[in-house]
């Protein structure tokens, strides 16, 4: 029994201590408390690790969205006003949107609300709209 107690105390890095249990039930009780303490510590540490991982993932997804919106702006010159509206939309709806989705134009047009779709479509197709008299205001 003493050797099992020694191995539990050593493996859990609790240490030897100055006061040692003498009787068999004291050894068992001390080992149970030590093992439960280790499991509690593992649970708390695992939960904290999971929370930090989620924060990092969410932050990375947000950075990717912002980069994609700026890439969209540099490619199609959609303007600062629409960039701000798109960023605000994604910030407000980040929980309901896929965090890992790469937003290509077709997916973006599916998920955006109607007013942002219209503004984005007008900017993307402004050359065609300028050529066709029927589409002009």
Image (spheres, rainbow, N blue to C red):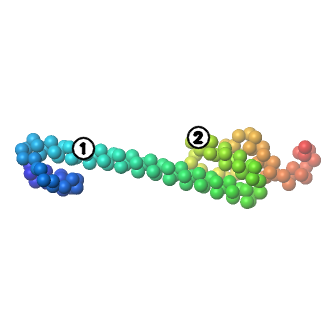
Report the residue at 60% width, 55% height from top.
64
Q: Which residue is mark 2?
A: 96
The image position of residue 133, as x and y in percent, is 93, 47
Horizontal side of residue 43 vs 19, given as left or right? right
Circle count: 2
Under circle 2, the secondary element is: loop
Q: Give the residue at mark 1.
A: 36
Q: Secondary structure at mark 1?
A: helix
Place residue 15 in its image quadrant. bottom left
Inter-mark Cα distance, 1 to 2: 38 Å
Q: Can residue 4 be seen in the rendering of this structure?
A: no
- Rendering coords of residue 27 (x, y %): 11, 46
Which residue shows up at 71% across the image and 56% down it? Answer: 72
Q: Quadrant of the C terminus?
A: top right
Looking at the image, which residue is at 62% across and 45% down?
Answer: 91
In the depicted view, which residue is nearer to us: 15 or 86? 15
Residue reaching furthest to the front: 18
- The x and y percentages for residue 36 are 24, 44
Front residue of this view, candidates 8 and 20:
20
The first of marks 1 and 2 along the sequence is 1
Q: Position of residue 114 (x, y in %)?
A: 74, 39
- Residue at 74% in and 43% down: 116
Q: Residues within 10 Å of mark 1 (few under 14, many from 20)?
A: few
Q: Quadrant of residue 71?
A: bottom right
Q: Do the residues under discs 1 and 2 have CB atoms within 8 angstroms?
A: no
Farthest residue, direction right: 133
């Amino acid at each position: 029994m003493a050797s099992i107690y020694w191995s539990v105390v050593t493996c859990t890095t609790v240490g030897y201590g100055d006061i040692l249990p003498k009787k068999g039930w004291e050894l068992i009780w001390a080992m149970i408390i030590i093992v439960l303490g280790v499991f509690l510590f593992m649970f708390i540490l695992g939960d904290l690790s999971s929370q930090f991982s989620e924060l990092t993932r969410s932050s990375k997804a947000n950075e990717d969205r912002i980069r994609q919106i700026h890439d969209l702006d540099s490619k199609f010159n959609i303007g600062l006003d629409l960039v701000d509206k798109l960023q605000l939309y994604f910030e407000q709806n980040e929980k309901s949107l896929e965090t890992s989705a790469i937003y290509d134009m077709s997916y973006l047009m599916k998920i955006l609300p109607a007013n942002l779709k219209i503004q984005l479509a007008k900017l993307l197709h402004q050359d065609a709209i300028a050529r066709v008299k029927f589409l002009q205001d």
